[in-house]
Image (cartoon, rainbow, N blue to C red):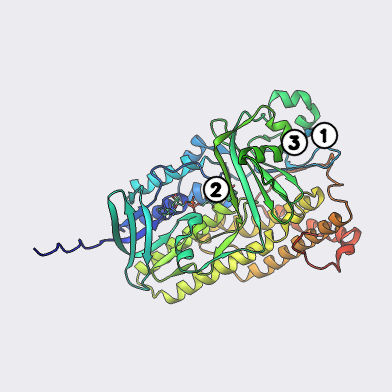
Amino acid sequence: MKAEAPAPAERYDVVILGGALSGASTAMLLLRQNPGIRVLILDRAEKLKRRVGEATVEVSAFFLGRVLGLTRYLNEHHIAKQGLRFWFVNDEVESLDQAGEIGARYQVRLPSYQLDRAELDEEVLRRATEAGAEVRRPVTIKDVMLSSGGDQTVTYSTQDGSRTVQARWVVDASGVAAFLARKNGWWRRNEEQPTASAWARWKGTKDWDGLELAEKYPQWANAVHGIRGTATNHIFGDGWWSWWIPLKGGDTSIGVVFDQRLVNWPEEGKLGDKLKNFLLENPIAREILDGAEYDPDDVHWRRNLSYYSTTFAGDGFVLVGDAAGFLDPFYSPGMDWISFTVCSAAELIRKQRDGEAMAAPVEKFNRDFSVCYHRWFSALYKDKYDYLGEFDLMYLAFRMDLSLYYWGVVEPPFREGLKALHAPPFSPPSGKLFGTLMSLYNRRFAAIARRRRKMGELGRRNKGKRCLIPGFTLERKDMFRLFGMLGSWAMLELKEGWKSWGDSARSETGA
Ligand SMILES: Cc1cc2nc3c(=O)[nH]c(=O)nc-3n(C[C@H](O)[C@H](O)[C@H](O)COP(=O)(O)OP(=O)(O)OC[C@H]3O[C@@H](n4cnc5c(N)ncnc54)[C@H](O)[C@@H]3O)c2cc1C
C-alpha cells in the first residue's frame, strides 16, 4: 500500500510568534492597514498571565490609547497613572516625612496608565482576533526556517503532534525567549548593564493618600495636592531602585532592580523573603509594607536584564518588543520600545505588500533600531545605577531626561500621529546631538557619585528635601526650562564636579 503524502503546509501572509502585547498589537495594525491579510498568532500560554511591565509612560500610553484605540478600555479597566515619584533616604532618615521626595505637586498633564498585563494583553489579543487574526494556543514554536523574499516555514507542536505553516512574513514577538535572535546567533547580552530584578505582587500595602499616613504626617500629606499612590513610586538606595505600582483591584506590584556590581543580593532563603527583607531595610518601604504580604505564587527573578539583537529585520521576518531587545526597566521604556518596533514592523510589511523593493527599507530598519538601542542605552542607562541613590543628582538628571523625552520623543506622535512611531528615538540625525548631550551629563553625574562613594559622602544630601515639580506639558515654554537645568548642571560642576574631572571611568567593582 502506498504511504499517504503529508498534507501541504497551511499558508498565511504573516505568522506571529507570541500573542502577548507585541504580537497581538502587531496583528491589530496589520489587519487594519492591509484589508484581507491572513494573520496567524501562535502562543504557548493557554491564557496570558500577569507579567512584569505594568507602567506605561507617555509614548506607550499614546500607542495603546490613540494608535490601538484603547483609551476608554484603559480608563475603565486599569488605573490612570500620576507620573513618577522618587524617595531618597540616608542613615538619618527614620520616617516617611523625613525622606527626600521628587514628584509632581499636582496631577500629571498627559495620560499614562498602571496596567494589569494579564488583563491588557488578553484584551489586545481578543481585539486582534475580532479583527480577523487566527490564534492557536497552547502551542510551542519549535523551529523557523527563514527564506529571504520567499516563504518562511514555522514548525510548532500541539498536544496532537507537530504542525508546519508557511507565510511570506514571520513576526517574532516571543519576548525574552527572543526566538529568532537566539536561533540565528544575533542575541547579545548588554555587558555594560549587569542588572537583575526580583518582584512580586502584594496585598495590604498602605495607602499613600489614606487617613493613617495623613494623620501621622499632616505636613507631608498637605505638601502634595495631587495623588501620590497612583504614581509609580520609586524608593532608591545605592545601586538599586524599587517600583511600587498599584493595580486595579488593590494589589501592588513591587520589584527591586539592582546593579550586580554594586549590590550584594542575599544568596540564601526563599526569593519572596529575600525581596521582603531587602526592602524592610529601608524606612520608607518599612512604612508602606507594614501589614502587607506578597503572594508566594507570584514571585519572580531575572538576571542580566539588558540585551539586544544584532539583526532586527530581513525580507520576510521582523523582530518586535522584547524579542528585539531590552534596555532597562528604569523609566519604563519597555512598552515605548514595543510601540516603535510594532509600528515600524507593520509599516515594513505594508511596504512589501504594496510592491516596494525590500532591500532599502530593511537596511534602514536595521540601521534605525541598532542606532536607537545603543544611543538610548548610552544616553540614559549606562552607569546610571552609580547615582540612583543621590537626591540632588537625580533631581537634575530626572528633569533633564524628562524634558528631552518630552521634546524629542513624546511631542512628535502628538503632533504627527502614528507616522512619528516609524522613526525610533535617537535614530534621526538630531539623535546624535541629543544622545551625546544626555550621555555626557549622565556620565558626569555618575562620576560625581563615584567620587562621593569613595569619600564616604553618598546620601548626605538626601534628608528632608522635597522638590515638587509643576508637571510637564508639550508647550514650548516648558521645553525651554531645559536651559535653566543646563545652567544648574554647570553650577554643580563648578561647585563639586571639577573634583572628579580627571577620574577614570568606572571600574568593575563600582569604585
Ligand atoms: C523587571 C522588569 C520591569 C519592567 N517594567 C516595565 C514597565 O514598568 N513598563 C514597561 O513598559 N515595560 C517594563 N518592562 C518590560 C516589559 O515587561 C516588556 O517590554 C514587555 O512585557 C514585553 O512584551 P512582549 O509582548 O514583547 O513579550 P512577552 O510579554 O514576553 O510575550 C511573549 C509571548 O511569547 C510567547 N512565547 C515565547 N516563546 C514561545 C514559544 N517557543 N512558543 C510559543 N509561544 C512562545 C510567550 O508565551 C508570551 O506570551 C519591564 C521588564 C522587566 C524585566
Q: Looking at numbered disc 2 in the image, what kind of residue is underneath it?
A: Ala
Label 3 vs label 2: CA separation?
A: 29 Å
Q: Picture coordinates of residue 375 (x, y %)?
A: 64, 66
Image quadrant holding the C terminus, namely bottom right
Taking the spot 67% from the left edge, 29% from the top edge, the residue there is 206
Which is more foreground, mark 1 or mark 2?
1
Q: Is mark 2 within 8 Å of ligand 1?
A: no
Q: In this rendering, would 468 be left or right of 19?
A: right
SS class, disc 2? helix
Name the residue beneath numbered marker 1: 94
From the viewer's perspective, is residue 227 above or below residue 402? above
From the viewer's perspective, is residue 95 above or below residue 162? above
Name the residue beneath numbered marker 2: 61
Comes first in the chain, label 3 or label 2:
2
Q: Picture coordinates of residue 43 (x, y %)?
A: 39, 51
- Based on the displayed image, in which of its 4 quarters is residue 83 positioned? top right
Residue found farthest to the left: 1
Q: In this rendering, would 113 be left or right of 130?
A: right
Q: In this rendering, would 245 be left or right of 139?
A: right
Label 3 packing within 10 angstroms: few (<14), some (14-19), many (20+): many
Is 453 or 336 nearer to us in this picture? 453
Name the residue beneath numbered marker 3: 284
Q: Picture coordinates of residue 149 (x, y %)?
A: 35, 73
Q: Looking at numbered disc 3 in the image, what kind of residue is underneath it?
A: Ile
Q: Is mark 1 within 8 Å of ligand 1?
A: no
